[in-house]
Every structure is written in structure tokens, then in C-alpha cells.
Amino acid sequence: MPSEDTSGCLDGWKSKIKMVDAVRVEIEFKSSESKYLRMFSGAYVRGFVYWVIARNNRSLASELHENKNLAPYATSPVFGEKGVVEKLEEGKTYRFSVSFFVPEIGEVIKEYITSTGEIFFAGTSNRLKTARVQYFDFNIDEFEPIEKFAVNFVTPCYFRIPSNKYRFLPLPYPPLMFRSLARLYEAFVAELPLNYRSWLDKHAIAISGCNIRTEKVTLKKGMWTVGFIGRANFTIPKDTYNEEFARITAALLKFGEISNVGGGRTSGFGVMRVENMESATDLATSS
């Protein structure tokens, strides 16, 4: 199962991040002034990450900017006491997180947050309160195969539909959702069986219920996108159940809590939280 170290201490960072599959840094800051955010706050976090990387490692920043492959990091939007915020208020505390899968990004983030007691964010300097670090491993063999689960999509999520033209789907469609997670997992952790995707395409994972709504989100002037938020329940029906693939699905779900899912991951889209994961063993015991 994923291993976590939430001590908040940055000691041993360099040696440890090379031994795990993913690292998440949660940054908490106190706003120095009140200001409305002109776009989705996750876009500000993405800008912050690029700014930090560029000031410490310009070649890495250029490489990330020009990279056409999957981005080796993901962000959250800015959260306040009541969830995602659209405005910062002077004197109040806010937080956001950055997850990454390559140690080079971790090094520049650490260099920045350990060299100053402030954080430059959304055009102003703010007092840095804490920086907490979590380390994760995703060994599929350590997961129990699941049959039922729920996912809470915290921030807008959408999936790209393969076609000659740009198309997207703002719905929790299982084949697209788990193909997205599988691509990320294979890019940064380990390979998966080729027939797992064929299994997904046979509608092996079904939606058993959902309570979602769509939101239109501004990214920057003249640019916007639409995604869905809310809760969706899923099940692996008995006629498609496969123990190996159910175990992989469990691992991908927990991985998705770190990587985000769908489009716009680096701008805080697709933040997901897994709820009520029931293993096949649990179901057999309770029946």
C-alpha cells in the first residue's frame, strides 16, 4: 500500500525521493493581501511551479515547457477553510499541493521553500507557514482486489476522446478514466499488462450511480474549459470480474489521488479522492 511520511520535515528529502514512486508537498501560506483570482486557482499554482523551477533550473523549466509527453507533476488548486477559493483574503491561511514523479522537480522546490520564510504567489509575497511532505509507493501486489468503490471528483475533470479533432467528455466514463490513470502509471511507475486496456474497453467497470454537475472554468483571458465535479459510484460486475485487473484498478485509484486524472492535471484539474473501497474479501465476509 502507499507509504506516507507526514512529519513535515524536509530532512533526508534528496535520498528518499529517489527511492519512492511519488512525492507530494503541501504548502500552507498566510495571504499578505486581499485579491480576487482572475482565473482558476490551480492555474496560479501551475504558474508558481514553473516560476520556482525557472529561477533555480532554467534548462529543466524549458524541458518541461517544451515537453509534449505526460507532465511529471500535478497540482491542486488553492484551498481555504470551505474548499477551493476564488479570492484570497488578507491574514487568512490557504494551502495547495504539488505532486511529482521525478526527483529533479523536488530538488528545485525544496531549494526554494527552505531558502526563505516567504512564498511568492499570485503576484505577492506571502508568509510561508508550513511545508509538509508525503512519500508514496504503489506496488500493485500490496493491494487487495476490489469490486465496488466511489470517487469524489473534487475539482473539474474531463477526458479527451481520441479523434482527429479535439474532443472532450465531462463525464466519469470508466474506460477513459482508467486508461488515463494507466498511461500515467506506466509513464512514471511500472508497466501494466497489455490486456488490461482491452478489459476496460469491454466495459468491465460500470457506473452504478452518480451525483455530478459540470462547471465552466476560466484558465486565462479568452480561454476556458468545462469539467464535472461530484461523486460517482463504480462496480466491477461479476461477469467481467478479474482478480488481477481488480487489483490493478485498486492501485490505479490510489495512484490517481496523487497524480490527478484526465486533462489539465498541472493546473489542478482532476483532483480525486477515493471513498468506500470494498475488496472482494470484504464483500464475501459481509454477505
Image (cartoon, rainbow, N blue to C red):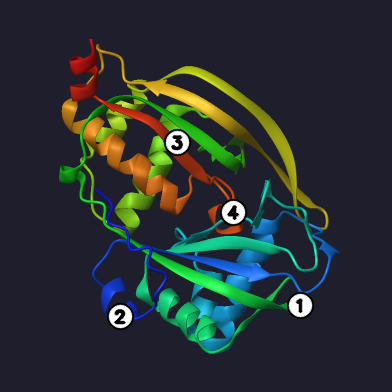
Looking at the image, is 58 positioned above or below residue 148?
A: below
Secondary structure of the residue carrying numbered label 3: helix
Circle 1 is placed at which residue position?
Answer: 124
- Identify the residue at image location x=19%, y=16%: 284
Q: Residues within 10 Å of mark 1 (few under 14, many from 20)?
A: few
Instruction: State the separation of the CA atoms marked 3 and 4.
Output: 16 Å
Label 2 vs label 3: CA separation? Answer: 35 Å
In the rendered image, the vertical position of residue 98 relative to residue 192, given as above or below: below
* Residue for point 20% across, 35% down: 144
Asked if residue 87 lies left or right of residue 261, the reply is right
Question: On residue 12, which mark appears?
Answer: 2
First in residue order: circle 2 vs circle 3 = 2
The reply to whether the C-beta atoms of the residues labelled 3 and 1 are less than 8 Å apart is no
Relative to the observer, which residue lies in front, 197 or 268? 268
Sequence-wise first label, 3 or 1: 1
Say which of marks 1 and 4 sits in front: 1
Q: Can you give x and y, in whole percent of width and height, for residue 34 in the image? A: 84, 66
Q: Element under label 1?
A: strand
Q: How far apart are marks 4 and 2 (CA)?
A: 28 Å
Structural crowding at the residue carrying mark 4, measured as other residues with C-alpha within 10 Å and reported as few (<14), some (14–19) or many (≥20): many
- Return the disc, 4 or 2, that comes first in the chain's sequence: 2
Q: How many labels does the image show?
A: 4
For the residue marked with disc 1, what is the amino acid? Thr
Real-space Cα distance between discs 3 and 1? 37 Å
**Which residue was labeled with disc 3?**
177
Q: Name the residue under label 4.
A: 268
Image coordinates for residue 137, horizontal then vertical, percent = 26, 57
